[in-house]
Image (spheres, grey):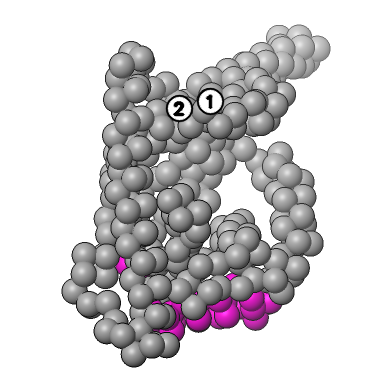
Amino acid sequence: MSRRKWIKRTLLSIAFVLALTAGVSYWAFKGTPEYYQRRAMSEQERADAAERARRKIFRTQEWVAQLRADAQRAVHAASTGAPPPSATTRSSQPFSVSFTEEELNAGFETWSKAFGWDVRYARYISDPRIVLRKDRLILAGTVPDVGTVASFHFEPTIDAQGQLVLTLRRVYAGRLPMPDLMWTSQRERLLSAIRQRLPAWQRGATMAPNGDPNRDAMMAAASNLLLAVMNDQPGDPSIFVWDPANKAATPVRLTEVRLADEELTLTAEPMTAAERKAMLERIRAPESSATPLAR
């Protein structure tokens, strides 16, 4: 074989391999991950799942309302000498709630339509889904601009120090791992926007003696947690749970986050007055000097 023919065949072979690689990569980029292909549910099944989710959320809100009432009675007792709430009430005990994957997705879909959320996020993402796998919480959705499924794979847990760890393990575009460069700019814009607003929220953050936070405290707490997640750092497990009956939020501490295939279980505990005060101090602390939760 002449040198010219050998070079020509070699180049053709390389071109074929590159074309094949590009084709496979394009197929993987446009491909739909298996976890995004959920079982088709009838309208009745979807309605039943959404109703189960609603009832579980309602039970959680009942517990939170009892916590808030107990905290208010404790404040009243401290100022008047009245008997404080019993330490053995149901609301003083840890509370656990479990959601299936179908319940979370059916509930979110129902509430998105009811409150118009779907109209707001339709420009950025369509058909969002929550996927629950053992040790993985996956948030996925189709990105209209690129025509593929983007998915963020988190590993949530409570570490040995009691901190909430929500590690972002992988980001995928279709079936392909998404290079950091593809979403670094969006991540940095988000972090920059949070850091610009966070100091004002921290300065304005307050919490009533019974634990009721103002809006700045809730925004600062959520921002601190998001910064921790995006920077791959442990976050504060003390969170606010909304109580719609009283139009207020109540602080609780997450003590367990357990994932199994298609099920998520959360366990939380009430907080004492001293713990609520310490939480507010952490919320107001500058990002560089924030201290972890003391256990």
Q: Amino acid at mark 1?
A: Lys
| Foreground residue among 2 and 31 | 31
Q: Quadrant of the N terminus?
A: top right
In the displayed structure, 77 sits above or below 127; it is below
Horizontal side, residue 254 vs residue 23: left or right = left
Q: Amino acid at mark 2?
A: Thr
Spatial CA distance of label 1 from label 2 is 6 Å
For image coordinates 53% across by 25% down, the residue present is 113
Q: Secondary structure at mark 2?
A: helix
Looking at the picture, does residue 49 appear above or below residue 235?
above
Q: Do callouts 1 and 2 mark residues in contact (Cβ within 8 Å)?
A: yes
Mark 1 sits on what residue?
Answer: 113
Residue at the outermost bottom position: 81
> In the image, residue 295 lies at what x, y percent?
38, 81
- Residue range in magenta is 269-295
Please rate how many residues cluster around mark 2, counting C-alpha atoms within 10 Å: few if below 14, some from 14 to 19, many from 20. Answer: some
How many numbered dots are placed on residues in this image? 2
